[in-house]
Image: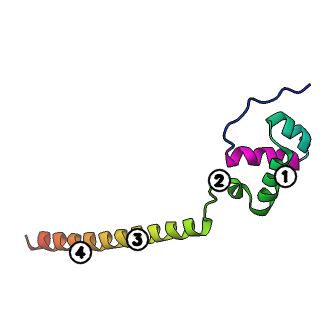
Amino acid sequence: MEEREPEIQRWTAKRKATVVLEVLKGKTTGVEACRKYGIRQSELEGWTKRFLEGGENSLRSNPREERAEYEARIKELQAKVGELVLERDVLKKRWAQIRESEEKT
């Protein structure tokens, strides 16, 4: 008889995805997974449905808005590029001034 895993109070998206993938890959049946992990069949069915619709992200308690995250990251990186270009331009001008003053002396 298979031992039951210790009860988990909070199921992370990654843990849910692992259980769903075990079932989808045929490593275990839904009934066996429910027994092993102490979850209801309806819970597993819900996880499976959500997983198939949107992958691991859909199993999170607060699914991330991936597009919004990417857009925010793009804005961050664009701002950083702007800062670096400005810094480069200032350094170029300063370097030219230094070279010019050295040539005069």
- Per the image, label 2 sits on a secondary structure element best described as loop
Rendered residue at 61%/65% (across/down):
66
**Residue corresponding to mark 1:** 45
Position of 43 with respect to 83 (left or right) is right
- The kind of residue tagged 1 is Glu
Nearest to N terminus: mark 1 or mark 4: 1
Nearest to N terminus: mark 2 or mark 4: 2
Tag in front: 3 or 1: 1
Q: Residue furthest left?
A: 105
Check whether the beta carbons of the residues at disc 3 and disc 1 lie within 8 A of each other. no
Q: Residues within 10 Å of mark 4 (few under 14, many from 20)?
A: few
Rendered residue at 68%/57% (across/down):
57
- Per the image, label 4 sits on a secondary structure element best described as helix
- The kind of residue tagged 4 is Lys
Q: Position of residue 20 (x, y in %)?
A: 81, 48
**Residue corresponding to mark 2:** 61
In the rendering, which numbered label is found on residue 93? Answer: 4
Q: CA distance from mark 1 to mark 4?
A: 64 Å
Nearest to N terminus: mark 2 or mark 3: 2
Position of 17 with respect to 82 (left or right) is right
